[in-house]
Image (cartoon, grey):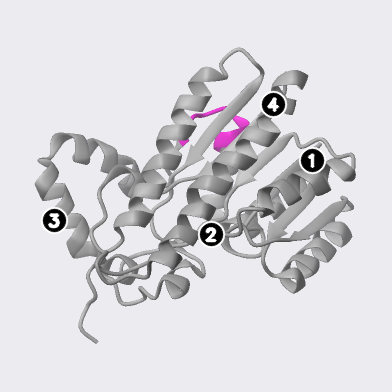
């Protein structure tokens, strides 16, 4: 069995790689950092005796998805599990943020995720076996002033995953959306949002989020929301006026005084 994991060099993706390798999945590891991927591959091979394929790729480049598919095919690998974990945020007021950064973010968070799913799901359906795990977020449930495009991208991931899961019923292929809250990874530093109230609160650890996602994926769940407080969020959002939800969301994303 083989799993392909994007964003595997750190955080949730790294922890998922450990979980899959522990269960004897060979791993195709995708991220920008060749050195970090190589170090992870060496660890997985030595600790778990599995095979790895390292693909140092930048998913913000449109040609990358085809390159990944071609290299996996050239290695005669059949991807049994696809984990679309890669993603990053852009923080700030939309009128002030950099458009090129937001377009790159959409390429990673939305376009690459969709394209990789399209390319690999067909083989899964033909074999009548496969699993797909897409990294959404609790951001998918609410609007996100100061992170408008990022929150919208995660809403796409959740909606896409739920719809695809429905389409694939009876094919032997499942789709799971993992929707964690704020998690301790390199996400906050890359988004330059370390001082946001949301980040100043209690953060989940990447290992526990990965474990929840892994278990949900293997159980065939469509949506996995780690943490009791996070599980209550969709309920609260449905019962609250939208303008209040948006206002509270903005307050959580505002910077706290230093």
Tell me the tag on residue 112: none
Q: Quadrant of residue 114?
A: top right
Which of the two marks, 2 or 1, is nearer to us in this view?
Answer: 1
Mark 3 vs mark 2, CA separation in Å: 28 Å
Where are the magenta residues, as a range? 216-223
Find numbered disc 2 in the image and state the secondary structure of the residue it sits on. Answer: helix
Sequence order check, earlier mark of 2 and 1: 1
Residue 235: image location, x then y, percent: 24, 36
For residue 198, above or below residue 225:
below
In the image, farthest residue toward the bottom = 258
Q: Nearer the viewer, mark 4 or mark 2?
A: 4
Q: Nearer the viewer, mark 1 or mark 4?
A: 4
Q: Is residue 22 visible?
A: yes
Q: Check contact, mark 1 vs mark 3: CB within 8 A.
A: no
For label 1, the SS is: strand
* Badge 1 or badge 3: first in the primary sequence: 1
Which numbered dot is residue 122? 4
Cα–Cα gap, marks 1 and 4: 16 Å
Residues at discs 4 and 2 in contact (Cβ within 8 Å)? no
- Mark found first going from the N terminus, 4 or 3: 4
Question: Which numbered disc, 1 or 4, marks the residue that appears first in the sequence?
Answer: 1
Q: Residues within 10 Å of mark 1 (few under 14, many from 20)?
A: many
Residues at badges 2 and 1 in contact (C-beta under 8 Å)?
A: no
Q: Position of residue 38 (x, y in %)?
A: 80, 67
Is residue 219 covered in magenta? yes
Q: Write down the residue under mark 3.
A: 247
Q: Residue furthest top?
A: 170
Residue in the image at 78% along x and 70% along y: 39
The residue pinned by badge 2 equals 206
Q: Residue 2, which numbered label? A: 1
Pick whichever, 255 or 153, lies toward us: 153
């Amino acid at each position: 069995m083989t799993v392909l994991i994007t964003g595997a060099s750190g955080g949730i993706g790294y922890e998922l790689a450990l979980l899959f390798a522990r269960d004897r999945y060979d791993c195709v590891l995708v991220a920008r950092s060749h050195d970090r991927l190589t170090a992870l591959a060496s660890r997985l091979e030595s600790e778990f005796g599995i095979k790895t394929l390292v693909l140092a790729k930048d998913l913000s480049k449109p040609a990358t998805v085809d390159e990944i598919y071609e290299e996996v095919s050239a290695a005669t690998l059949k991807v049994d599990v696809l984990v679309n974990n890669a993603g990053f945020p852009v923080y700030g007021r939309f009128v002030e943020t950099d458009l090129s950064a937001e377009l790159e973010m959409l390429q990673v968070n939305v376009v690459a995720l969709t394209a990789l799913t399209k390319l690999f799901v067909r083989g899964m359906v033909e074999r009548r076996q496969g699993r797909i795990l897409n990294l959404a977020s609790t951001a998918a449930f609410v609007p996100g002033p100061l992170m408008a495009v990022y929150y919208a991208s995660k809403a796409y991931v959740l909606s896409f995953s739920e719809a695809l899961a429905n389409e694939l019923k009876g094919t032997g292929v499942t789709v799971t959306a993992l929707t964690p809250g704020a998690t301790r990874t390199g996400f906050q530093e890359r988004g330059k949002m370390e001082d946001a109230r949301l980040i100043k609160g209690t953060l989940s650890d990447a290992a526990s989020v990965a474990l929840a996602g892994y278990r949900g994926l293997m159980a065939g769940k469509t949506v996995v929301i780690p943490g009791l407080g996070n599980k209550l969020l969709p309920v609260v959002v449905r019962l609250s006026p939208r303008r209040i939800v948006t206002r509270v969301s903005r307050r959580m994303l505002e910077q706290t005084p230093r």
